[in-house]
Every structure is written in structure tokens, then in C-alpha cells.
Image: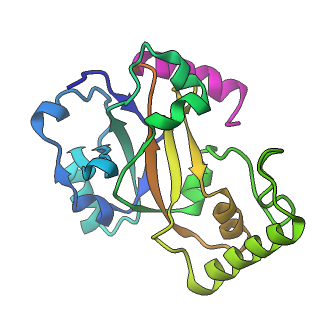
Amino acid sequence: MSTILGYSSELYFLDPQDIIALADTPPEKARLVTCPDEIVIFMGNAALSNADTLVCGRESVQKAIDEKTDYIPVRFVFTPTINPWNLLPIFFKKLRQPFKFTNQNVYHTTLAHLRALHIERGFRNAQNAYIMSKRWQISPEERIRRYQELSKSLTEKGFDDKFPIAVMFCRRCGIKDCVDDGHHRIGICTEHHIERIAVNFKAAGALPYGLQKIGLKFLNFFTKCP
């Protein structure tokens, strides 16, 4: 097992009820985790039927439940599928795609908590919905139809946990987390004040933890997220 782990650049405020049900991380994996955070989750891999596990903080999670605390800060750790010396896939999206994996757990947070992290890659609304790139275009009529259909579903049925907002750890330069999928849902939830949402997570590679912390200082100083 690799001893080089990746860490989420952000703390995610999650519903403790989603966390308490997790099994404990096996000791041989837990001892590799070096971050100092109180509550840490080890990300699993849905393709391998590996669920997320709780590295540390079970007592804190239970205390939050007992005290009826709605959301608590959590750091995630994962085993990268890209070797840290293989920088090209870490830095370039097209090369990174084959290495991406998703966890099988879904967590609940609030729109306000997620947006406060400044990890969106842009903001989607009715005016710019589904305008992606020159290589991926649809007609204005189809854009409007899709956006209106999604908006109707969210406002009438609420947020569907089967389609969580996907956040990718260390997506930017192996350093910074970013929303990977769900910008239109974020825009609609913002417009209609839908607060409770569901999230899941993706990962691939990451710079070593020490370099990540240094890199984050520069990224957070100069920009928020592309």
C-alpha cells in the first residue's frame, strides 16, 4: 500500500448522521494519515465497492449528534491513483481522466457551506446555462429547455440525493479542490434558496501534503478557483 496520501484542500461541513454510520478505517491505513484535523474520513472507491471509513473523530461526531449540531467540519484523505512523480496527469485534465475515481457515499451539507469554500469553477444561471465550449454546443432552445426542466425538478421535488454535487479533491494542480459536476444545480439552488444539498467526491492525484499546503497559500492569495 502506498504511504503517500492525498488530502482535501478544504474542510467540509457535513451532517454528522451521515458520518456516524461509517465503519472505522483499518489501523494499518489510519496510521498513515498525518493531518491534524479532529474528524477525518478516508475516501473509498465505488468502482471497487470500497465505502468511505472514519479515520478519527467518532467521539466528536457522536457528541455533535447528542448536541443536535447540524453540520460539522471534516477533512478527507484518499489514496491517489496517480503517482506523485507523474506530474502531467496531475496538472492536465485530459491526462487525468482515466485515473479519476468516485466514492460511493453521499453526504449532506448546505449550499451556504459549500459556496463559502469558493471551489466553483464558474456560476451557472439561465443566461449562460449549458454553454460549455466550442466543441460541445447545443441550440439556445435546447439550453433553455434543459435548464427549465432541471429548475422545475429542484423546485417541485427538492434536491435529489441520487444526483449529488460532485467535488473533486486536489483538482487544480494537485492542490485545490473544485466542483467537478453540478454547477447548474448550484445556480438553481442559489436562485430558489434551496439550502440542504447532497455531495459526493472524486479524486485522482495530489501533490504531497507539505507541498500542497505551500501551494494553497499561493492559490488562495492570487485567486479563488478557475
Quadrant assignment, res 178:
top right
Residue at point 87%, 63% (across, down): 127
Camera-side residue of 141 and 184: 141
| Residue 193 among magenta residues | no
**Left or right, residue 146 beside residue 213:** right
**Quadrant (top left, top right, bottom left, bottom right) of the C terminus:** top right
Residue at point 44%, 29% (across, down): 205
Quadrant assignment, res 85:
top left
Camera-side residue of 147 and 73: 147
Extreme bottom residue here? 156
Residue at point 62%, 78% (across, down): 154
**Quadrant (top left, top right, bottom left, bottom right) of the N terminus:** top left
| Residue 220 among magenta residues | yes
x then y, percent, for residue 198: 48, 64
x then y, percent, for residue 62: 22, 60
Q: Is residue 113 above or below residue 84?
A: below
Q: Which residues are magenta?
A: 209-226
Quadrant assignment, res 100:
top left
**Left or right, residue 103 beside residue 187:** left
x then y, percent, for residue 153: 63, 81
**Left or right, residue 171 beside residue 152:** left
